[in-house]
Image (cartoon, helix red, strand yellow):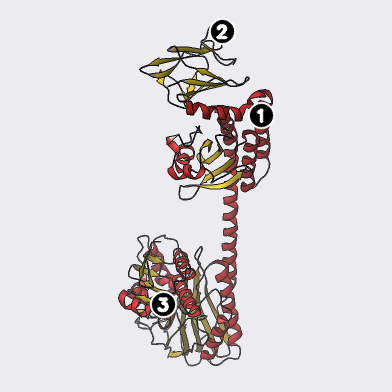
Amino acid sequence: MSHRLLVAPPNAPPFEHVLDGGEVVIGRARTAGLMVPDASVSRHHARLFERDGRWWAEDLAARNGTLLNGVPLSEATPLGDGDRLQMGGTTLTYATTAAAARVEAAGAAAVTDSALVPGDRQAARLQTINAVHRALATPIALADLLDLILDRCFDVLRPEEGMILLGGPDGDWRPVATKRSARATGEMFVSRRLAEEVAGRGRPVLVLDAALDERFADAKSVAMSGVKSVLAAPLADADGSLGMVVLASRVAVRRFAEDDLDMLVSIASAAALRVRNVALAEEAAARRVLERELALAHDMQMAMLPRRLPAHPAIDLAAHLTPARSVGGDLYDFVEDGTRLWFIVADVAGKGVAAALVTAVVKTLFRAGVRGETDLTRLVSLMNAELCRDNDHLVFVTAIVGCLDLDTGRIAVGDVGHNPALLVRADGRVTAPELPKCIALGVQDDATFTCGGLTLESSDALVLYTDGVTDARRPDGTMFGDARLQAALEGAGGATAAAVLARLQTAVDRFSDGAPPEDDLTILVLRYRVR
Amino acid sequence: MEIREELVGDVVVVAPVGRVDSTTSSALDARLTALDAAGRRRVVVDFGAVEYISSAGLRVMLSLAKRARDTGGRVALCALDQSVRQVFDLAGFTALFTILPERGQAVAAASG
């Protein structure tokens, strides 16, 4: 078996050195067995020697040290096929077989053009780092920033393909930018193991030959992408890793070296901070848009509530809507029309601005519908027909709509898919009046509606509410429910409407124990008193 | 949310687990929409493991029923516990669906 070193000095063409004679000292001194033309290499830098049929490397206390596959060489270490020794600017690749040597030769040929003009190459690299820094200082969108980082990497490192991965919400690493040269063929190189090593652990990696390097030879990724040389550097700052930049080429086209990795690490670390800032800014902007939308929906919804409740000697009214942060769509309203008081409590199924818009439609339909109307059933049917028209989003509305005759205490009530109304009698009894149950509005355009009626005695209070009351949850997940609702109202007989409302609201608040409301919560109390 | 799925003959039984509310209902909607896109038009939704459904969940069911009506599909619901059943009843949705106690009955109804 032949043992060779492919020597690639920074300012001279690469050459091959055959290992024989059991020992060789490497250095820039003329007395070194293998002389390397590199000022950053010590006079006697390292020693290779043969023992038990293997070649070993040891550092001879060189000023700049020796790296073996990127790791400082602290003690004598046996070499394996393809291992790379780095001394100053010189890379030495160890090969044991004729086949490996051929691969090395192909790689050497491919990099010759750049190796021959080291001054220009170094200048180009400095320019690139400058360009990246300049670009990073200007305002830029995240997607453009990622593309720019890849562009600059291509300018100077000339890979066939490149990819940036960033951490996703589930802790996975997902591709967010890619670039390929025209000559690239086959599938792009992707390795989960590489991402775990580089992005996950923050370690830069130079893979000499993805097919031979067992660390990253995910069977699938390599089979799909062929034999490639890979450079990968973490996008990491003081707060941790954001992801990584990975560059790859077929080995026959471009074979990366340690100084390529240094270059990529420089670009990646400069980019990381900016990527972090831009990503945070974009996330904050998206959050602001969402919050503005929620605030708008909230304002629209609250603007629809009556500023003042109707004041009439025959009635005592109280109403309150507690909006939830993200889910909404509750509404209540009153219209006084001669001796009649129309009222509605509604819950639009949906959230945000869309629900707020439908809420506005419901209010408009209600207000327009009651003008000159005497028949509650007709009003409800008209509202349903309008809400069914072009209802592509299947938004439906549950409601209790009613009309109180202020002279007699007689109420016509329509329950369209809503939580049942409750009646608190003057003596404190709580009952659910028997009312016909109809389907919610906006579901069936040919639905028929039946309304019911009841008569309020003096001091009776009709309590209407939305499912924000019954579905309120305390921190352990238990819901308020019908029984607690009933219990909260018992004993409230004879109390003012405001007192009944406060009693129920307090019961829900105590029960929720600080848990934020998940749905709008509306309570309306209509108390009747005979003049 | 966890959504179990099983194919019984030509009927897909979809069984969501936990709460079907404004947070989770979009996942269920996406699953049911995907079944429709895949040409699966006979669907049973098994509520056996559902502890709560909100109006957002009802919208998903409404959307399922509407698609079935438009495409000639068949839908049946089963194993609604009392509280879930009450939400359907309150909204007046009970009449819109074939609701059966047991999964087997619902599968039979959907395969019709």
Residue density around tag 1, few if under 14, some if 14–19, many if 20 or more, within 10 Å: some
Q: Residue at x 57, y 39 (%)?
A: A272
Q: Residue at x 42, y 12 (%)?
A: A22
Res. B100 in view: no
Q: Is residue A186 above or below residue A73?
A: below
Mark 3 and mark 2 residues within 8 Å of each other at the beta carbon: no
Q: Chain of mark 1?
A: A
Residue beneath label 2, please? A30
Q: Is residue A96 above or below residue B52?
A: above
Q: Chain of mark 3?
A: B
Q: Is residue A108 above or below residue A59?
A: below
Left or right of residue A94, residue A487 in this image = left
Determine the CA span between mark 1 and mark 2.
Answer: 32 Å
Of A103 and A79, the residue lying toward us: A103
Determine the CA span between mark 3 and mark 1.
Answer: 67 Å
Q: Chain of mark 2?
A: A
Occupied quadrant, residue A374 = bottom right
Occupied quadrant, residue A29 = top right
Total residue callouts: 3
Query: What's the amino acid at mark 3?
Result: Val
Query: What's the amino acid at mark 2?
Result: Arg
Left or right of residue A345, residue A143 in this image = right
Residue beneath label 1, please? A126
Residue density around tag 3, few if under 14, some if 14–19, many if 20 or more, within 10 Å: many
Q: Judging from the image, what secondary structure is the residue with disc 1 in?
A: helix
Q: Judging from the image, what secondary structure is the residue with disc 2 in?
A: loop
Res. A396 in view: yes
Percent of width and height locating residue A358: 57, 74
Percent of width and height locating residue A371: 61, 88
Residue beneath label 3, please? B75
